[in-house]
Image (spheres, rainbow, N blue to C red):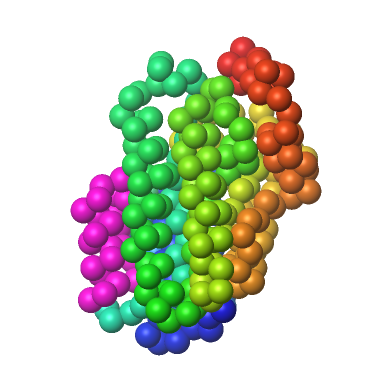
Amino acid sequence: MSLPVPTKESVVVVTGASAGIGAELARQLAALGHDLVVVARREDRLLELADDVRVSHGVDVFVHAADLREREARVGLLGMVAERERHVVGLANNAGYGSNGRAWELDPDGEEGQVALNIAALHHLTLAVVPEMVRRRAGAVLNVASGAAFQPMPGMATYAATKAFVQSFSEAIHAELAGTGVSVTTLCPGPVDTEFGEVAGFDESSFPGVLKVSAEEVAAQAVRGMLTGKRSVIPGPQNKVLSLAGRYVPRTVLLPAMRRQTLS
Ligand SMILES: NC(=O)c1ccc[n+]([C@@H]2O[C@H](COP(=O)([O-])OP(=O)(O)OC[C@H]3O[C@@H](n4cnc5c(N)ncnc54)[C@H](OP(=O)(O)O)[C@@H]3O)[C@@H](O)[C@H]2O)c1
């Protein structure tokens, strides 16, 4: 069934809901009538979103401020959902960030933090919620990867590698879940105007406008993917073509070209 109809015992968890794609996912899942747990570090932003969504859609929204790089914080999140006697019918593992530059010249803690958030948190939360979804024969996980998942990226080495993990792990689990009523959808957006570029330290305008898809449209396609149990969602036709290039252009050609573009 993938994402089932909402009930008062169920909830959808959205991580990274204080900005960008996550905030849009939260709004659109609430519009379907789902009660939400919204998670990020900036509580003020989450409270603002929660007020807005409650008024617009009449759903319950539980705000949980947490740094998901920390295992304890993830355990706390799962405990909070259990305390409220809700079961998770949807999980959007959206929180994530990147960095820009030669990996060995960047802040090592920032690089390690990407592994903790983009990989470990997503892995932990996915494996925490899927068993109960399988027992109930319904549920949808959305794991946010990136167009960066399709090839190594000089200039974003750690980030692209984390997203390759997300894609590989999520597609494999999706296949393992065949016939259970539960799906794991991998979302691979190209460039989206959010706070991502500012956090990663690069100029958003360096991306051709033709590749850009709005956060609203990305979230709409992602939510449709959760409803229909799709394996993979790549918003934007140009980004679909680029994903093929990332997979099939030989690395001997691709890597020097990317290095020239991102590190010159
Ligand atoms: N924008 C793009 O071009 C693009 C393209 C492909 C993929 N993506 C992926 O899309 C996802 C959403 O990114 P976005 O573009 O919406 O970026 P964004 O506007 O920077 O939002 C990132 C979200 O993640 C949260 N977050 C960051 N660190 C966190 C932590 N340690 N613990 C908990 N939450 C944390 C942020 O909230 P706080 O700062 O409040 O914690 C924020 O809500 C990411 O996984 C990103 O890799 C983005």
Picture quadrant of residue 221: bottom right
Q: Quick check: 94 above or below 247?
A: below
Q: Is residue 67 magenta?
A: yes
Q: Which of the two residues, 254 or 39, is positioned nearer the viewer here?
A: 254
Picture quadrant of residue 171: bottom right
Lateral position of residue 98 relative to residue 191, left or right: left
Q: Is residue 237 magenta?
A: no
- Where in the figure is residue 145, as x and y percent of width and height? 54, 47
Lateral position of residue 132 relative to residue 4, left or right: left
Lateral position of residue 113 relative to residue 34, left or right: left
- Where in the figure is residue 235, as x and y percent of width and height? 69, 52
Lateral position of residue 199 relative to residue 210, left or right: left
Q: Which of the two residues, 36 or 180, is positioned nearer the viewer here?
A: 180
Picture quadrant of residue 86: bottom left
Quadrant for the N terminus in the image: bottom right
Asked if one can make out residue 36 in the rendered structure from this viewpoint, the answer is no
| Residue positioned 64% across, 71% down in the render | 228
Look at the image and give the residue range highlighted in magenta.
58-83
| Residue positioned 63% across, 56% down in the render | 232
- Where in the figure is residue 41, as x and y percent of width and height? 33, 51
| Residue positioned 54% across, 23% down in the render | 155
- Where in the figure is residue 13, as x and y percent of width and height? 41, 66
Asked if one can make out residue 115 in the rendered structure from this viewpoint, the answer is yes
Quadrant for the C terminus in the image: top right
| Residue positioned 26% across, 47% down in the render | 70
Q: Quick check: 126 above or below 243?
A: below
